[in-house]
Amino acid sequence: MDLNIRGRRALIIGLAISMVLADEGCNLILVSRTAADLHAAKENLRKTGVSVMTHALDVSSSASID
């Protein structure tokens, strides 16, 4: 499948979709409340050759986002 999104950046909520987008060449920004989960996901996704940024925060809390 080619979604024509190579080189784009995406905010991801959910690991499964991040794998699909990484396979399409999309650079990723991952957000999770758990830093350890983010680290594991980042290491796995780096194998695809895309850029992966992570942020450990709770998106339901405006204080975390600020």
Image (tube, rainbow, N blue to C red):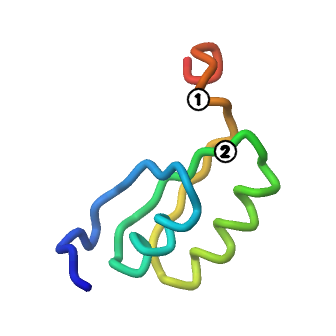
Horizontal side of 26 relative to 19 (left or right) equals left
Question: Furthest residue to the right?
Answer: 36
Q: Residue at (66%, 77%) from the top-left corner?
A: 44
Q: Amino acid at mark 1?
A: Val
Q: Residue at (41%, 81%) from the top-left corner?
A: 23
Residue 32 in picture, x, y percent from top left: 66, 45
Relative to 66, is 58 above or below?
A: below
Horizontal side of 65 relative to 9 (left or right) equals right
Q: Amino acid at mark 2?
A: Ser
Disc ID at residue 32:
2
The quarter of the displayed image where residue 65 is located: top right
Horizontal side of 28 relative to 36 (left or right) equals left
Residue 16 in picture, x, y percent from top left: 54, 67
Residue 18 in picture, x, y percent from top left: 49, 65
Q: Residue at (67%, 66%) from the top-left corner?
A: 41
The quarter of the displayed image where residue 20 is located: bottom left
Q: Earlier in the sequence, mark 1 or mark 2?
A: 2
> Relative to the observer, which residue lies in front, 8 or 12?
12
Disc ID at residue 59:
1
Relative to 32, is 39 above or below?
A: below
> Relative to the observer, which residue lies in front, 15 or 9?
15
Crowding at dot 2, Cα within 10 Å, few <14 / some 14-19 / many 20+, comes out as some
